[in-house]
Amino acid sequence: MVEKTKISERLDENIAHMEELFHTCDDIKKKRMNLGKNRDVACYLTFIEVSVDMGNSALLEVLKYLRGLEREEILRVLEQNALGTSDATYFTTIEEAGDGLLTGEAIFFVDGFAKAVKIPDDGYPNMGVNEADSEKVVRGSNEGFGDSVKQNAALIRKRIRSPQVKVKEKKAGVRSNTNVYLVYMEGIVYPELVAKIEEQLDGFEIDGVLDSGVIEQLSEEKWYSPFPQFQTTERPDRAAMSILDGRVVVLSDNSPIALILPTDYNSFIKTSDDYYNRWEIA
């Protein structure tokens, strides 16, 4: 049994552990702040960006409440679970806090308090567009990718709630500066594959990348081949299954089409129904 890491009263230690657990996760936001009347209470907030609404949520109310308290009062409120929200959950280990973060909620650390607090929000919203007409299934999720690369990455995290899922942000297009995410599973994927994809993206000299199709055409090594060299999908579940197989999913902003690589001939005749139904039906 793997020994879990206890949360410390020292904020810097907790931040270091969380940074180590979620390294190369560019879709997860981390924010240091000082609360209390004298702004003398160091805090750390982390969450998946699109799953928490900072403008209108229980989290915002909690932060406003803590800004008006003295340091001793803040620690007492935390000890007594008197944050003003009934669904706050306390964790005593870094691993539990990481699991709480991956449910789509915000995780809150306070210097001098040896627990992490999960502050409830809406979690993963129903972000996906309607099911793609080109990939309808008899059984399975009806969510599909949309045009936001951040929401698309969250749709994958919604299905694989593991800190080993890494999301690496890149820029493509000299003038468009399009956000491109590489999503993969650390420990399963070949690191050389990720490095090669990064090298190709960094080598693009083009004014704009307005769709993942541009990345596909620029990355093809044998452009004269009649066979596609990338698998494409609009389904988050299919992308998630590919990541669990050790492949890399490339998401581009403003495009609902994800690229999956490497690929082979069998990948083009496999559908999500192959996973969800008995073999004779699928």
Image (cartoon, rainbow, N blue to C red):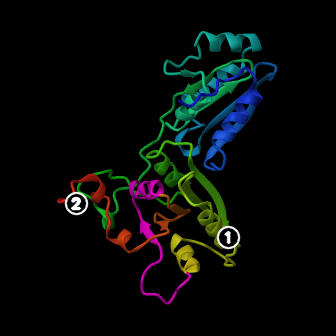
Residue that sits furthest to the bottom in the current view: 224
Which residue is under mark 2?
Answer: 282
Please give the name of the residue rendered at 59% of the width and 59% of the height, measured from the top-left corner: 181
Please give the name of the residue rendered at 65% of the width and 43% of the height, measured from the top-left corner: 29
Q: CA distance from mark 2 to mark 1?
A: 38 Å
13 to 148, vertically: above or below = above
In which image quadrant can residue 79 be found? top right
Which residue is under mark 1?
Answer: 199
**Which of 146/185 is in front?**
185
Q: Which residues are magenta?
A: 221-245
Question: Is 215 positioned to the left or the right of 203 in the image?
Answer: left
The tag earlier along the polypeptide, 2 or 1, is: 1
Please give the name of the residue rendered at 43% of the width and 46% of the height, measured from the top-left corner: 159
Asked whether residue 232 appears in the rendered view, the answer is yes
Q: Position of residue 78 (x, y in %)?
A: 63, 15
259 to 99, vertically: above or below = below
Give the numbered dot on residue 74.
none
In which image quadrant can residue 93 be found? top right
Q: Secondary structure at mark 2?
A: loop
Q: Position of residue 184 (x, y in %)?
A: 54, 56
Q: Position of residue 68 (x, y in %)?
A: 72, 18
Q: Position of residue 133 (x, y in %)?
A: 31, 65
